Image (cartoon, rainbow, N blue to C red):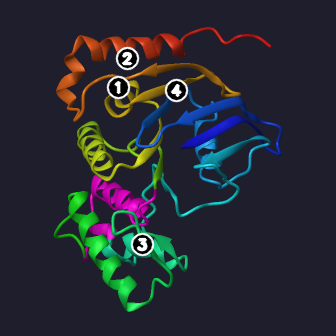
Amino acid sequence: MLIADHISHTYPNGVEALRDFSLHVSRGQFVAIVGPSGCGKSTLLRILAGLIQPSAGDVWLDGERITQPSPRIGLMFQDAALLPWRTVEQNIRLPLELGRKTTWRGNGNSEIGDWRSSDAQSLISSSIADLIHLVGLSGFERAYPRELSGGMAQRVALARALITHPPVLLLDEPFGALDAMTRESLTDSVEDILRETGTTAVMVTHSIAEAVFLADQIVVCSPRPGSVVGSVHVGLPRPRAWAMESWPEFGALVGHVRELLTQPTPTT
């Protein structure tokens, strides 16, 4: 479904972030990308999102080359970046106000032209209500960001990323700034939500345990310039629970990923 074909990228200042990085993601799959700081993981996500163009290689979504941001690809960052003057509902609605049309999967697969039409507004209101319930924020529809905890703000950011019902969701260290308990709670929620919506996901993370908990496949990156040094299949059953962390299988997967991360970088 999503293909990064031999991606390389060098910034104007001469920093080579990625070198010959290839990635194949199947529909409905959750892929986690782990690697040392500065290995180009975030650069890769921005290329997949169409925010920047690679120096070499191509990105394809369902056979269509990605050259610019698309409503079919949602993006969630570490910083929730909520607008402080807008309520939870209004922040979630924002992506629809920034464009004139969006595709609504899960609502009859119909495409809405003008988001301001009465028919569109009815579907939008219903979808926002569903998402607020899905991310566990019922009762906070009219709350402002200053009234939310960090974890609640990230839940709003997740709902905002899903409001266009994108087939693909990209997550760039979305839980990195949260405390351990909130982080576990949110990863639990994300696992449930993506399983329920059938969304294909690609996430970059520094947490090996988080990658094992969420992913079907873990791609391990080399130090900069980032390239693929290995891939680990995660066959743990779903739904997942953090109690699995004590399972021998879970520990073996963590050990395998850590072993790949500590392999010497080949000289070129």
Residue type indicated by callout 4: Val
The residue indicated by pointer 4 is 219
In front of the other: 261 or 219 = 219
Is 11 contained in the magenta span?
no
Determine the residue positioned at 46% across, 62% down: 81
Residue type indicated by callout 3: Ser
In front of the other: 211 or 112 = 112
Q: Is any atom of residue 38 visible in this view?
A: no
Marks 4 and 3, how far apart in space? Answer: 35 Å
Is 144 contained in the magenta span?
yes
Determine the residue positioned at 32% across, 74% down: 89
Instruction: Judge whether 138 appears above or below 170 on screen.
Output: below
- Give me the disc on residue 264: none
Q: Badge 2: how crowded within 10 Å, few (<14), some, or many (20+)?
A: many
Say whether disc 2 or disc 1 marks the residue closer to the N-terminus. 1
Say whether disc 1 or disc 3 marks the residue closer to the N-terminus. 3
Marks 2 and 3, how far apart in space? Answer: 42 Å
Residue 149 quadrant: bottom left
Residue 41 quadrant: top right
Residue 239: x and y in percent read 22, 35
Say whether disc 2 or disc 3 marks the residue closer to the N-terminus. 3
Residue 13: x and y in percent read 82, 42
Task: Look at the magenta stretch and give its main secondary structure.
Answer: helix
The residue indicated by pointer 2 is 254
The residue indicated by pointer 1 is 209
